[in-house]
Amino acid sequence: MQKVKGIKKVEERMLSESLAPRFSHARVEEHIDAVLREMDFNTELFESLLSFYSARLQAVPDAEGANTEY
């Protein structure tokens, strides 16, 4: 359950950004870092976030600016 909360927190932070910088590599890293710092260190959560990282980044150009499933 904590993994889902962490991922949702990262998504909330990303959606609070304006569209242009929202999906930049640096901003995604900043959001992940901030959420991990807010939570107790949890290896499972970190692994879960990393496992979806490349798919999340690829979803942006695949969606051609539209909403993604992430």
Image: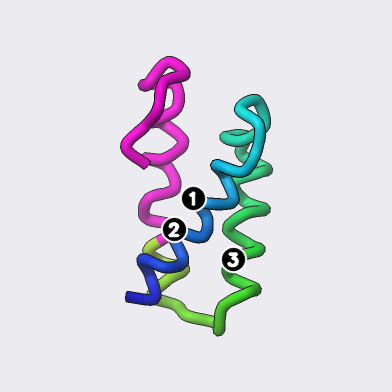
Which residue matches tag 3?
Answer: 35
For the N terminus, the quadrant is bottom left
Q: Please tell me which residue is depicted at 42% across the width and 42% down the height of the picture.
A: 54
Query: Is residue 2 shown in magenta?
Result: no
Magenta residues span 49-70
Q: CA distance from mark 2 to mark 3?
A: 10 Å
Circle 1 sits in a helix, a strand or a loop, which is it?
helix
Which residue matches tag 1?
Answer: 11
Of the residues shown, which amino acid type is indicated by label 2? Answer: Lys
Q: Do residues under tags 2 and 1 come within 8 Å of each other at their CB atoms?
A: yes
Mark 2 against mark 3, which lies toward the viewer?
A: 2
37 relative position to 52: left or right: right
- 3 up-or-down from 10: above or below: below
Of the residues shown, which amino acid type is indicated by label 1? Answer: Glu
Pinpoint residue 18: horizontal percent, then vertical percent. Answer: 66, 32
Which residue matches tag 2?
Answer: 8
